[in-house]
Image (cartoon, rainbow, N blue to C red):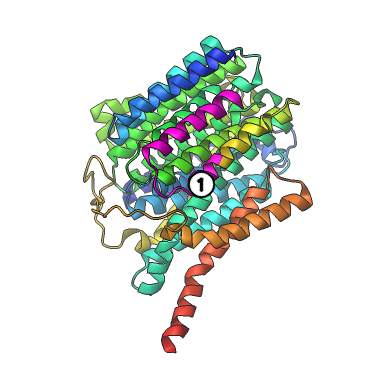
């Protein structure tokens, strides 16, 4: 870990936080901190951190499913960042409870958070081969099945949140494109976050950077489509989130650690501006109405994220680092991991090892979801997350059941 | 959107899948997908009427259909990606349906059921021969055109 970069980022966030709090005393906006119901700004960072809480885990799960080889450290960082972002969004919802009036699907987010935690924990335990090799092998078998369960759940929760938001809070966003746009934002912010987190590790992944640039073009197209549909859009967010990443074409910025960090922070700021536009529907609202109290609550989230992330990263460093030496780029096409030549196996339908792991848990999960939907008539918000939750728990129990069962059979 | 424009969109998706079959490498495939998203957005904005809420996701439905076509030409893990692509299409259609219901419009539930049925059925395929590939493409085109 690059302690110099991490230290500078954390000190900068704390300094900006203190400066903003001091400024809020000067411009008289400090009173907003003391639970002012008319304060609307906290909704913006709350939505931002909620989006970010799904970004890391979505990217990690997607890479695993699509067979994109990345270092274990990279995926662990993504999963950990998701959990930290979730903690920050929970903090916002508690600290600014009077300001945040969004009726969000709390149980859906909670279920997704729990599943992310399970995914992260199984990844950690599978990595710790020094303790119990057999358990590690069993746990590594369930990682991909868990990813298969989590991917649709993330899509479902993000879509149901955005549909709910459009219906209850802001009818301008009603329509079938908005959920897709939100999921695209989640995905894109995951790439930006990954570049920033890898900078903390003194590591550079060219493949991810290329995908980030390509995704910025996708996002630009989606932005213009949204502009075409709704007749309005935040141009500043387009500049920060889609134009600034093109700086990666300049070799000096691409090769420089601070350059990469700055570009990824700009992208995340662009996403924040998108969130602000989503809440206020005004292009220049963020810059024209920003008070020191607003900046304070914003930097509070940033400082909190960096502090929690670094503390957990430091505590779990033995899982992250092992014997890997990650300095600079190892290969342009991979994330440094040497490709393993695996023979292509063909399985008959529903008999692949991964499917064997998930078939019974998913069946039980679907039954639980159907029963829930039947009794509550809530098919949109929670039927799928409950099905995924039951499936996830049962899949995670399998390694332990296998171990106990095989141990007994071995004794006989 | 007229029947002819709808059919043309389907052919456009097929032609992009054809182009994707000929490209190797993750970055090149992603670049081509980007080009296809751009083309489908331009096509929809040219022929579509934006007062219709059903057209909001039309270009992305075209992309999803193209992904489905593309998976028939894969060499490895074809069944898995076929189900994944159809699930993406299903997700798009489901979100469209829910948003249409929210707006008081009628949702195309039959199309949803058809896609779900084909996605589930394609999971049972042991060996996907040329004939089955062709049959699947025709089925998807039929779902696109008639449901």
Q: Is residue B20 visible?
A: yes
Give residue A387's position: percent from left, percent from top: 62, 54
Is label 1 in a helix, a strand or a loop? helix
Q: Residue at x 62, y 48 (%)?
A: A109
Residue B123 lies in the magenta stretch: yes
Q: Is residue A216 left or right of residue A338?
A: right
In-image side of A134 versus B54 (left or right): left
Chain containing the residue with disc 1: A
Q: How far across and how far down the image is residue A303, in percent?
A: 50, 45
Rendered location of residue A96, percent (x, y) = 68, 43
Determine which quarter of the picture holds residue B4.
top right
The number of numbered badges drawn on the structure is 1
Q: Is residue A258 above or below residue A358?
A: above
Residue at 49% in and 51% down: A148
Q: Quadrant of the C terminus of chain A?
A: bottom left
Q: In this orientation, which residue lies closer to the viewer: A113 or A251?
A: A113
Q: Position of residue B103 (x, y in %)?
A: 73, 26
Q: Residues within 10 Å of mark 1 (few under 14, many from 20)?
A: some
- Comparing A183 with B106, the one in front is B106
Q: Which residue is mark 1?
A: A151
- Farthest left residue? A330
Name the residue located 37 percent from the left edge and 44 percent from the top edge.
A8
* Residue bounds of the magenta highlight: B118-147
User: On screen, B31 above or below A143?
Assistant: above
Q: In this orientation, which residue lies closer to the viewer: B132 or A262?
A: B132
Q: Is residue B31 shown in magenta? A: no
Determine if residue A297 is in view. no
Extreme residue toward the front, this view: B131
Residue A366: name its quadrant: bottom right
């Amino acid at each position: 870990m690059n302690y110099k970069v991490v230290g500078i980022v954390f000190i900068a966030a704390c300094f900006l936080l203190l400066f903003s709090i001091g400024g809020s005393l000067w411009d008289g906006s400090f009173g907003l901190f003391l639970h002012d119901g008319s304060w609307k700004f906290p909704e913006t960072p709350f939505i931002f951190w909620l989006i970010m809480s799904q970004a890391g885990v979505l990217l990690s799960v997607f890479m695993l499913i699509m067979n994109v080889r990345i270092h274990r450290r990279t995926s662990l960082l993504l999963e950990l960042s998701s959990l930290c972002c979730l903690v920050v969004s929970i903090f916002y919802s508690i600290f600014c409870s009077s300001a945040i009036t969004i009726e969000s699907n709390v149980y859906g987010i909670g279920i997704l958070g729990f599943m992310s935690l399970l995914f992260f924990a199984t990844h950690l335990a599978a990595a710790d081969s020094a303790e119990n090799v057999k358990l590690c092998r069993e746990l590594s078998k369930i990682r991909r099945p868990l990813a298969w369960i989590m991917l649709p759940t993330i899509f479902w929760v993000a879509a149901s949140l955005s549909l709910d938001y459009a219906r209850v809070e802001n009818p301008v966003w009603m329509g079938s494109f908005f959920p897709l746009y939100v999921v695209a934002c989640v995905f894109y912010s995951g790439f930006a976050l990954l570049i920033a987190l890898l900078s903390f590790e003194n590591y550079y992944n060219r493949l991810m950077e290329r995908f980030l640039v390509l995704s910025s073009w996708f996002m630009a197209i989606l932005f213009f489509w949204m502009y075409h549909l709704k007749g309005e859009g935040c141009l500043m967010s387009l500049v920060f989130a889609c134009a600034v990443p093109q700086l990666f074409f300049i070799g000096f910025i691409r090769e420089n650690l601070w350059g990469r960090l700055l570009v990824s922070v700009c992208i995340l700021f662009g996403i924040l501006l998108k969130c602000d536009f989503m809440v206020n529907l005004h292009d220049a609202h963020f810059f024209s109405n920003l008070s020191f109290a607003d900046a304070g609550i914003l930097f509070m989230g940033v400082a909190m994220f960096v502090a929690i992330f670094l503390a957990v990263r430091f505590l779990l460093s033995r899982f992250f680092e092992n014997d890997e030496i990650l300095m600079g780029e190892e290969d342009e096409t991979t994330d440094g991991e040497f490709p393993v030549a695996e023979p292509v196996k063909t399985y008959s339908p529903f008999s692949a090892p991964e499917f064997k792991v998930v078939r019974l848990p998913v069946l039980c999960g679907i039954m639980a979801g159907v029963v829930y939907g039947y009794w509550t008539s809530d098919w949109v918000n929670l039927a799928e997350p409950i099905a995924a939750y039951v499936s996830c728990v049962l899949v995670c129990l399998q390694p332990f059941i296998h171990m106990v069962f095989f141990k007994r059979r071995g004794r006989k | 959107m007229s029947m002819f424009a709808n059919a043309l969109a389907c052919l456009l998706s097929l032609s992009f899948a054809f182009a994707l079959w000929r490209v190797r490498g993750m970055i090149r495939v992603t670049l081509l997908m980007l080009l296809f998203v751009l083309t489908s957005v331009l096509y929809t904005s040219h022929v579509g009427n934006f007062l219709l809420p059903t057209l909001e996701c039309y270009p992305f439905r075209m992309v999803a259909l193209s992904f489905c076509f593309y998976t028939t030409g894969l060499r490895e893990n074809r069944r898995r990606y076929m189900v994944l692509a159809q699930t993406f299409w299903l997700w798009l259609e489901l979100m469209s349906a829910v948003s249409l219901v929210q707006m008081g419009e009628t949702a195309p539930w039959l199309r949803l059921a058809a896609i779900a049925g084909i996605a589930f059925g394609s999971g049972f395929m042991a060996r996907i021969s040329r004939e089955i590939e062709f049959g699947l493409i025709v089925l998807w085109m039929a779902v696109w055109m008639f449901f």
